[in-house]
Image (tube, helix red, strand yellow):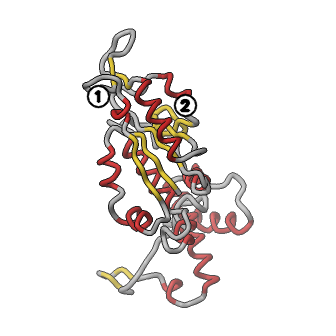
Amino acid sequence: MKFVFVTLFPEQIQAAAGHSMLKRGLDAGLIEMECVNPRDFSMDRHHSVDDAPFGGGVGMVLKPEPVVEAIRAAKAKAPGAPVIAMSPGGVTFRQELAETWAREETGLIFVCGHYEGFDERIYHWVDRKVSIGDFVLTGGELPALMIMDAVSRFVPGVLGKLASAEEDSFSSGLLEYPQYTRPVVFEGMEVPEVLRNGNHKLIALWRRKQALKATLLLRPDMLPAEPDKQDAKLLKEIREELEAD
């Protein structure tokens, strides 16, 4: 899986990818990463990439010429890869999109903006605008890195076990169930007995119930409109327990 970043700050991308899971994936050749800097395609001796907006206003706008040439260079490095512009006005990135993009054999190209954004005409060379939430950052590098991280988790071998990614929050449509490890008792708090009895059927049922409970309490909008028979029974139990408390 190849990730190409069109960015004015390649050092930010390289620094973030030099640690933890992303570094392991890169070192193992499971994922690849390259950066293309629009400044390399600037048309003046000052390597400027921005200019004042037509119509007036504060801030500066990224010029189309160097950005488009950088996108073309990125497409040459990852032929056929979708071009994704990081933009607060884009569709919201979600877990199912991470899983879908992990199957993109051609890779992904991220276009990272700065200042007051891009000249609108660059979007002619973009396949999709994507946002990570309803807020504005100083640049697109951090959101693009977050997406790279989320997508890489589904590339076989990056996590070691793909099941680790498949069992994460949102992959099942629910928030994740609580996790425990040794010691059994920590400062008076004990690991639930069900997780220690070796009965995998009961463990799976407990985990499902806990995932439903967490989702009901924190993200009720994620609950299925028409839960299956087992989930409906578990939700009924959860609501009765919460009312009793």
CA gap, disc 2 to disc 1?
22 Å
Nearer-the-camera pick, 177 or 237 = 177
Q: Are marks 2 and 1 in contact (CB under 8 Å)?
A: no
Nearer-the-camera pick, 192 or 203 = 203
Q: Which residue is mark 2?
A: 125
Answer with the quarter of the image where residue 44 lies. Answer: top left
Residue 193 vertical position relative to residue 138 in the rendered view, above or below:
below
Residue 241 in sight in this render: no
Q: Amino acid at mark 2?
A: Trp
Residue 135 is labelled as none
Q: Which residue is mark 1?
A: 47
Outermost residue, right side? 229
**Badge 1 element:** loop
Q: Residue 149 placed where, x, y %?
A: 45, 56
Q: Amino acid at mark 1?
A: His
Mark 2 or 1, nearer chain start: 1
At a point 29% along the width and 81% down the height, the residue shown is 187
**Badge 2 element:** helix
Residue 19 vertical position relative to residue 63 in the rendered view, above or below:
below
Residue 34 vertical position relative to residue 24 in the rendered view, above or below:
above
Residue 121 in sight in this render: yes
At a point 58% along the width and 62% down the height, the residue shown is 239
